[in-house]
Structure formats: C-alpha cells, structure tokens
Amino acid sequence: MSKLYLVPTPVGNLGDMTYRGVEVLRSVDLILAEDTRTSRVLMQHYGIETPLQSYHIFNEHQTVAGLVERLLAGTIIAVVTDAGTPGISDPGFLLVREAVKAGVEVECLPGATAFVPALIDSGLPCDRFVFLGFLPHKKGRQTALQALANEERTMVIYESPYRLVKLLEELKEVVGDERPVSVSREISKLHAETVRGSVAEVLTHFQQKEVKGEIAVILSGSCR
C-alpha cells in the first residue's frame, strides 16, 4: 500500500535524529531531499542507502503530479529537508495536499523543528504563540511588521543571518526599544547561542558581531 512519510531531520547535531526516523528512511522506496548533497551526509552517517531524488521549492510544482502518480502506483516515499520538519518554512506542504486529495496515506513523524527549542529557551510565554515563519522580503513586509505591534501572543519568526540586524531594527521601529525578544541561532550545534533582552539590547549585541547560522526570533506579545 502506498504511503507518504514526512521525516524530520536534525537542525544541528546529527545525534538528534530519531531511531524511527532512521528506520523509515531505510525502509521506503525513495527519499525526496531538499538538497541531496546535504541529505547524503545524514544518510551516510546512518548507513541509509535508499535512493535520493531532488525535491525543492524550485521544482515541486513541476514534479508533484508525477510523484502522486508514483504513490498511487504503490511507491512508498519519504520527504526530508536540509534540517527540521518538512512543510515548516520548507518544501512538503504541496505534496502532502495533493497526496491527501488523491487518497494516499500521509504520516508526519515527530522530531526536530527549530522553533520549538527556540521558543522554550526564550523564557517568553509559550502557552499561546503564533508561528510566522519568514516575513515577506518586499511586497507586504511593512504590513506584516505593523501587524506585530498589537499581536498579544508570543511570535515566532525565522530570519537569515544576513537580514537579522535589519529585522531587529525594523522591530525596534514598530514595537519599541523595550519589547522583550529572544534570538536563537545554530540550535543544537557546537556554537549554539540564545540572546535574550529588550529589542534594543539584542540589536546592539548582533550589531557588534558577524552573524552566522539559521535564526529563530521569538518576540513577546504586546500585553505579555
């Protein structure tokens, strides 16, 4: 019987891979990988010899129909991304949607997702939060930023290291100097860092150093 698995992969330390995730990747017929070069390192580490096929944001619309046909024909497929859970600011959603429409069984394994440890480590309320992923780069960015000012829930934002300082500068303009914020980078890696404080304090910290690694920004809600 055909099945589509979404398998989380480590966001940093390779040891964060789950036993079940390894078992599934060994057992499926095909692994769709965001970057086969990155995924091959993980596969070699765990002795996984399943064939890899490239599947990323630039080809997913062109390949999804053919992949659904393969699933319906009985192929068991797993999706992985470079790090974390497929579909969370990464490829995966489109294939899941079309597979569900076609009646294919879909299962997402529990596992690594960058924003969860960043949220917990922040010390900010996590009983109610909103995941915003990457904010728009150009069109709609100002609207998205303005919406943050009155949001009462804790906010989770992804950002690249090259745009982190700009984002913090924009947050300072929108929510003010004193709003609590936490920035986590290189989660579970050797040089992991979480910086907590006011927007102004955290901005000053990152203005004084070269920023590297994937970034998760946790912003306090307006009334919290």
Image (spheres, grey):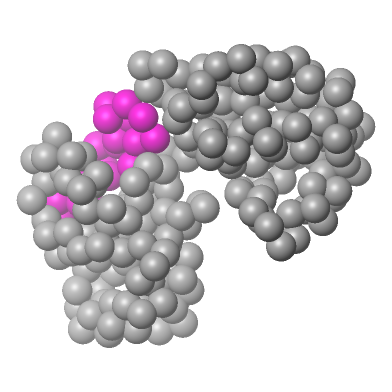
Residue plotted at (28% across, 83% down): 66
**Residue 17, position as x, y percentages in the image:** 29, 35
Pick the residue in front: 58 or 9. Answer: 58
Pick the residue in front: 108 or 197. Answer: 197
Quadrant housing the N terminus: bottom left
- Res. 157 image quadrant: top right
Asked whether residue 91 is drawn in magenta, I would say no
Quadrant housing the C terminus: top right
Report the predominant secondary structure element of the magenta stretch: helix
Residue 48 appears left or right of 129: left
Residue plotted at (24% across, 37% down): 19
> Is residue 185 visible to us here?
yes
**Residue 73, position as x, y percentages in the image:** 21, 83
**Residue 116, position as x, y percentages in the image:** 55, 34
**Residue 131, position as x, y percentages in the image:** 66, 46
Residue plotted at (65% across, 30% down): 165
Residue 202 appears left or right of 102: right
Pick the residue in front: 148 or 102. Answer: 148
Residue 122 appears left or right of 10: right
Residue range (magenta): 9-28
> Is residue 120 visible to us here?
no
Residue plotted at (34% across, 36% down): 10
